[in-house]
Amino acid sequence: MMAKSLPLIFTGVFLNAIAQLALKAGMRQIGHFEFTPSVLWDMSWRIGTNPYVVGGLTCYVVSVAFWLLALSRVDVGFAYPMLSVGYIVTAIAAYYVFGEPLTTIRIAGIAVIMVGVFMISRT
């Protein structure tokens, strides 16, 4: 039963990773800002109308639907650790898409996550 639910879990994970990347792309367009009362309306409008941000939030909503489907089929103790795969996907994608650093220590962390996810998936 758990193995049959992995596609649901990983679809949710990948949608969540896409959401992170889309949100980052949107905020790169908007740029750094301070969330102060003087810019609250302008920034809220710019964030809320940015297509990348809207797309990222949409991916989040769809990922929650997949997550709910998965949780209706498997133990949360099995499913929740699988979300760690999102860290791997996001770090690697951010390296290629945004040129973010993928240092040796990050690669080592990714390896540890991969071992942990493998061990949990074997239960």
Image: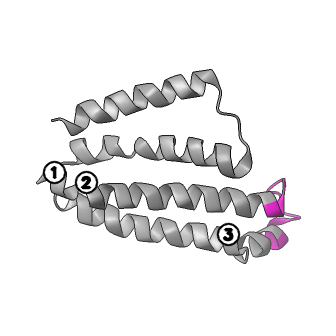
Image x and y of residue 116, in percent: 33, 29
Main SS, magenta residues: loop
**Label 3: few (<14), some (14–19) or many (≥20) C-alpha neighbours in 10 Å:** many
Type of the residue with mark 1 = Met
In the displayed structure, would residue 51 be above or below residue 117?
Answer: below
Q: Residues within 10 Å of mark 2 (few under 14, many from 20)?
A: some
Tell me the residue that label 1 is attached to: 2
Of 91 and 55, which appears nearest the observer? 91
N-terminal of the pair, mark 3 or mark 1, is: 1
Q: Left of 27 or right of it: where is 32? A: right
Front tag of 2 and 3: 2
- Given the image, on which type of amino acid does mark 3 rest? Tyr
Q: Name the residue under label 2.
A: 6
Magenta residues span 29-42
First in residue order: circle 2 vs circle 3: 2
Which residue: 56% across, 68% down? 57
Instruction: Classify mark 2: helix, strand or loop.
Output: helix
> Of all residues shown, which one is farthest toward the right?
38
Name the residue carrying label 3: 52
Q: Do the residues labelled 2 and 3 touch (CB within 8 Å)?
A: no
**Residue 18 horizontal side relative to residue 47, left or right:** left
Residue 74 visible from this viewpoint = no
* Residue lying at the far front of the rendered structure: 96
Secondary structure, mark 3, is: helix
Q: Nearer the viewer, residue 5 or 49?
A: 5
Q: Which amino acid does label 2 sit on?
A: Leu
